[in-house]
Amino acid sequence: PRVRADGCYVLPGLIDSHVHFRTPGLEHKEDWAHGSRAAVAGGVTTVIDMPNTVPPTLDPEALVSKAELVAGTSLVDYRFHLGADPRRPALLARLDPGIATTAKVFMAGHHTAPTVVRDPIALEKIFAAAAIGGVRLLLHAEDESIFTLLDQWQGEPRSYLDYERRRPRSGGISAVARVLELVRRYGTEAHILHLSSAEEADLVTAARAAGLPVTFEVTGHHLSFTDADTRRLGARIRLSPAIRTQADQDRLWEALRAGEVACLGSDHAPHTVEEKTRPVPDAPPGLPGVQELAVAVWTGMRRRWPEEDPDLAATRLAEHLSARPAEMFRLPGKGRLEPGADADLVVFDPAAPWMLSAHDVRSKCGWSAYEGWTMTGRVLTTIRGGQVAWDAERGVFGRPEGRWLSGAAAQDRPRTEITARDPRHAETEAQGPSRGAG
Ligand code: DOR
Ligand code: ZN
Ligand code: ZN
């Protein structure tokens, strides 16, 4: 088919390094057929999927069997993050990089966490083992204190607004501080997921400036909603970590503008309408977002910074949603449009205004917290591996021919560091594009 591209940006296929596509065991919330259609409708051609499934993927065997389940069902290329297992930290010291090079650590318990690392000794062992194995840890940095209120409130229904307001933000800040101390001690590469508050952004940015190999992700929803939206959206924006204040959101946007953010992610974590309409506090945290991520961030960028040259804005979007995740997660052939790269690209109309409705939602959960939003910018065509995976004008999807990007291809490639300096080799200067991140 012909691809219309006049007045559009042609960007490298976007990479969402943080999705929960729910296979195995939670397919009533999402599956790869729906999740990957949502992805290509949002311009995403590669996803990295999270381990908190049923059962969770806590060892290479579980990861390989997940790959077998997903094979032939995905429109996008995919990789899997392992889950760190507090009972078997040594797995990370000898993890086959052909299988996985990253592991997610849940530092506090909530509905969907697989194996929560509550024991500080186990957490320390995980950091030590990951440093030996060259594994990048992805941190869900929250402390139990965030959830203790929830226990106290059992049987005492209140509104979500009330609930979210009372969640102590200190539980996130102290968890980030613990992570930074362990990074300092062991030199482990750490990537803090869904960073949500101003204090946390300040802490991590200071640690980076001091040379620690730590990066952070910001999600589309933390850039799009504030606690003021809880009144309207209730448990739809009940998230872990929580949506915070306007001042926090402003700081996250500033971090994006300053290049402090390593990558953007959706934390696409669908739950059914039934689950999300349970009374306080039983609705699980999470929302769908892989489809909305790029357009919501673009909409926010144009609204916040109307003076910015749109070409620069589009470059910034491609940087944080394609080039950087490709480097960080060692995805050869991804991240840039250049000779020899995979033919993954997205045709993006930057000016088209449109209103998102539930009808547009491709996730199996069938709802979006962005319903009613007027978006600026639309994904017209998504091409993965040279094939049209999404054609918005005709409303047609391609075939599920996405590939498993096991770490194997990345193994013999030289590793690109995006961290400023490795404290184990203090004289080594930054390699590769760590632009503006200092
Ligand atoms: O809000 C969240 N939902 N945070 C998480 O860390 C997990 C996720 C989910 O899997 O539902
Ligand atoms: Zn998380
Ligand atoms: Zn997540």
Image (spheres, rainbow, N blue to C red):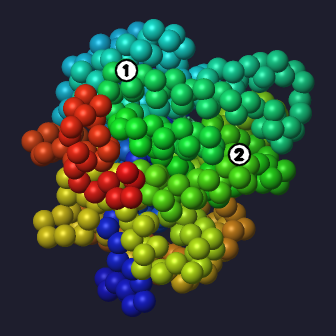
**What's the residue at 48%, 81% (across, down)?**
309
Q: Is residue 39 left or right of residue 109?
A: left
Q: Residue at x 23, y 54 (%)?
A: 432
* Tag 2 residue: 244
Residue 306 to residue 232: above or below: below
Disc marking residue 392: none
Q: Residue at x 82, y 18 (%)?
A: 152
Q: Amino acid at mark 1?
A: Arg
Q: How many discs mark residues in the rendered view?
A: 2
Instruction: State left or right for residue 16 relative to residue 26.
Output: left
| 222 and 252: which is toward the camera | 252
Q: Residues within 10 Å of mark 2 (few under 14, many from 20)?
A: many
Mark 1 residue's CB less than 8 Å from ligand 2: no
Residue picked out by circle 1:
185
**Which quadrant, please, contains the N terminus?**
bottom left
Q: Badge 1, how many Cα within 10 Å: few under 14, some, many 20+?
A: some
Residue 368 position in % (x across, y down): 65, 56
Q: Secondary structure at mark 1?
A: helix
- Place residue 138 in its image quadrant: top left
Of labels 2 and 1, the one closer to you: 1
Who is closer to the viewer here, 48 or 245? 245
Q: How far apart are labels 2 and 1 at the CA level? A: 30 Å
Among the two numbered marks 2 and 1 on one chain, the one whose residue lies closer to the N terminus = 1
Residue 59 is at least partly visible in this image? no
Residue 297 in which image quadrant: bottom right
Residue 322: x %, y % from top left: 35, 59
